[in-house]
Image: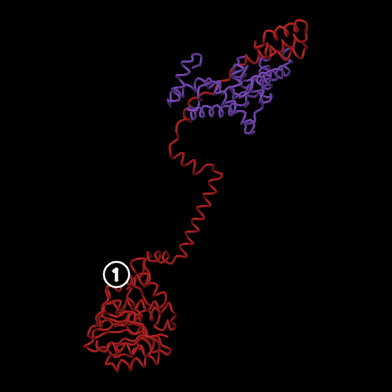
């Protein structure tokens, strides 16, 4: 399920508004990885990410009637996910996980020969740590832009920011990451 | 354009959102600045690494868990959640409330005689013939017990002198019992109290036996109370079939009593002299004293002809303050009057 075809998206939205449980399940299946990905990159651990992702979909389920359809459904989902993440981070209510540990674990399981790709693995771990060390308001922008592929305008809508603010924060975030990954790019 | 200005445009350049004039200026600067070209190269590689990150996937079963969580919870789960959650707050509060309610219930029970009485009434009461009371026993035997009444089985332990001093409350109780006795059916004279059980009453009994013409006379009801100890009275009271107390229960018991008996109190300064004056009055009006409970302040049973009843009551008013508790609507030929002489 994607929003590549506006007709499919609007039909899904209509079914959601009608309370069709199958439509809700389809929506969750279609957007689960994206929503979970944003939450995971922001929170740094899978447990918090799943909590937030589930909360995102439950909120959509409860308040689908309030969605006016001016933005894409995916943008609305990113909006909710971003706000929940930022609120959770601001409250300090999060599980403490050493940054990069889960990425290392995942790499060790995913790759047949981790030693062969040691440098690439190190780069990925360093990248995740560098992302995690970004200030939250910059991190969410770079996650939405470079990891999730949202446009500047969509990011501005999701985060309720001015376009210039989005550009500025994105550039600062990328420059921070470049500086932290400099040893990998001699 | 300076190196700083050019590097500020890197993001827009990489994302291809730079306006044409800005792109031209930036490109011109990069062409002349090797350091900025290296920086742009590092910048592009960083963005490239970012965009090449493998997307994170939601854990297996995530969709099912979300769909399950979105199902409306059963009503009882909502109730339980509201009642018990958060546990660390609700449980101590609810435990405290239970303790307070229990304490309040005990307090109310202990301070509500009706409840205690009802609890006692539910306990089994020993069934044995009444003892220690002469004519009152006769009365108890003569009166058919009310449904569920256990009263006749309650033993009476106290001697008749157990209550010499009468307070206002005792007077009111006695007056109520006098009403009860007034309505009791005339007991059989064949059921006198065992002498051994009431020696005091026997010694004080000075009245002659009733004449053959007179109806069988039982000891007046107030004498019941005078020969009963407190616990005995309590048990007797407890034997009532309902939870009513005092006059209400007595009223129920008195439904079977005859209506031809008059009862009243004679309040005097000196009971002994009043009783003597009463005896003289009875003799004067042609009546008969058929029973006397005590030598001092006590109860005197009188039989008086109907035509002499008015003169008798006028004489009583002269002796002391005569307060009839009950008088029959129509006087029988022989009026039986119970006079309680009190201070």
Above or below, B140 against B314 in this view is above
Observer-nearest of A186 and A63: A63
The answer to whether B116 appears left or right of B41 in the picture is left
Residue B291 location, quadrant: bottom left
What residue appears at the point 73 percent right and 18 percent down from the top-left corner?
A: A179
Question: What percent of the width, then of the height, locates residue B75?
Answer: 43, 38
Label 1: which secondary element:
loop
What residue appears at the point 49 percent right and 55 percent down from the top-left corner?
A: B101
Q: Is residue B206 visible?
A: yes
Chain identifier matching the purple colour in the rendered picture: A
Residue sitting at the far front: B21
Question: What percent of the width, then of the height, locates residue A90?
Answer: 64, 32
What residue appears at the point 65 percent right and 16 percent down from the top-left corner?
A: B50
Count of labels in the image: 1
Chain identifier matching the red colour in the rendered picture: B
Q: Is residue B197 visible?
A: no
Question: What percent of the width, then of the height, locates residue B302?
Answer: 30, 87
Colouring rule applied to residues: by chain
The answer to whether A13 appears left or right of A46 in the picture is left
Observer-nearest of B112 and A185: B112
Residue that numbered label 1 is attached to: B146
Question: What percent of the width, then of the height, locates residue A123?
Answer: 68, 16
Host chain of mark 1:
B
Crowd tier of the residue under label 1, counting other residues whose Cα lies within 10 Å: few below 14, some 14–19, many 20 or above: some
Residue A147 location, quadrant: top right
Observer-nearest of B40 and A131: B40
* Quadrant (top left, top right, bottom left, bottom right) of the C terminus of chain A: top right
The answer to whether A27 appears left or right of B203 in the picture is right
What residue appears at the point 26 percent right and 85 percent down from the top-left corner?
A: B335
Observer-nearest of A26 and A16: A16
Residue A91 location, quadrant: top right
């Amino acid at each position: 399920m994607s929003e590549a075809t506006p007709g499919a998206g609007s039909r899904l939205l209509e079914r959601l508004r009608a309370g069709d449980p199958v439509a809700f399940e389809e929506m969750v299946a279609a957007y689960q990885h994206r929503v979970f990905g944003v939450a995971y990159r922001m929170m740094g651990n899978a447990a918090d990410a799943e909590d937030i992702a589930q909360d995102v979909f439950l909120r959509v389920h409860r308040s689908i009637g309030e969605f006016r359809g001016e933005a894409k459904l995916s943008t609305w989902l990113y909006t909710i996910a971003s706000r929940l993440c930022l609120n959770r981070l601001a409250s300090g209510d999060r599980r403490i996980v050493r940054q990069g540990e889960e990425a290392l674990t995942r790499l060790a399981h995913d790759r047949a020969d981790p030693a062969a790709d040691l440098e690439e693995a190190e780069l990925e771990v360093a990248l995740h740590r560098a992302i995690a060390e970004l200030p939250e308001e910059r991190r969410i922008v770079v996650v939405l832009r470079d990891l999730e592929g949202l446009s500047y305008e969509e990011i501005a809508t999701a985060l309720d920011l001015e376009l210039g603010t989005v550009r500025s924060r994105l550039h600062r975030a990328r420059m921070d990451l470049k500086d932290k990954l400099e040893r990998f790019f001699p | 354009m300076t190196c700083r200005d050019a590097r500020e445009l890197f993001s827009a350049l990489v994302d291809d959102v730079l306006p044409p004039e800005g792109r031209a200026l930036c490109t011109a600067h990069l062409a002349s600045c090797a350091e900025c070209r290296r920086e742009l190269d590092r910048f592009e590689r960083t963005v490239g690494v970012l965009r090449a990150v493998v997307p994170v996937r939601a854990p297996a079963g995530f969709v099912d868990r979300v769909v399950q969580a979105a199902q409306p919870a059963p009503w009882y789960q909502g109730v339980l959640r509201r009642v018990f959650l958060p546990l660390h707050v609700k449980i101590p509060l609810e435990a405290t409330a239970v303790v307070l309610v229990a304490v309040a219930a005990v307090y109310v029970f202990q301070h509500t005689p009706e409840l205690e009485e009802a609890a006692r009434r539910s306990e089994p009461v020993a069934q044995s013939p009444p003892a220690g009371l002469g004519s009152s026993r006769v009365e108890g035997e003569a009166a058919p017990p009310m449904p569920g009444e256990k009263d006749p089985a309650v033993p009476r332990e106290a001697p008749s002198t157990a209550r010499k001093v009468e307070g206002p409350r005792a007077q009111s109780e006695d007056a109520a019992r006098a009403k009860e006795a007034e309505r009791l059916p005339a007991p059989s004279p064949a059921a006198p109290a065992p002498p051994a059980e009431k020696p005091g009453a026997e010694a004080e009994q000075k009245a002659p036996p009733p004449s053959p013409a007179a109806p069988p006379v039982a000891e007046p009801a107030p004498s019941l109370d005078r020969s009963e100890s407190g616990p005995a009275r309590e048990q007797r009271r407890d034997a009532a079939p309902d939870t009513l107390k005092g006059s209400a229960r007595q009223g129920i018991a008195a439904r079977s009593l005859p209506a031809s008996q008059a009862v009243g109190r004679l309040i005097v300064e000196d009971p002994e002299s009043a009783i003597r004056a009463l005896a003289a009055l009875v003799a004067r009006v042609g009546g008969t004293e058929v029973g006397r409970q005590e030598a001092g302040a006590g109860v005197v049973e009188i039989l008086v002809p109907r035509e002499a009843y008015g003169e008798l009551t006028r004489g009583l008013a002269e002796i002391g303050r005569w307060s009839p508790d009950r008088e029959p609507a129509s006087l029988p030929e022989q009026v039986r009057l119970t006079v309680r002489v009190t201070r």
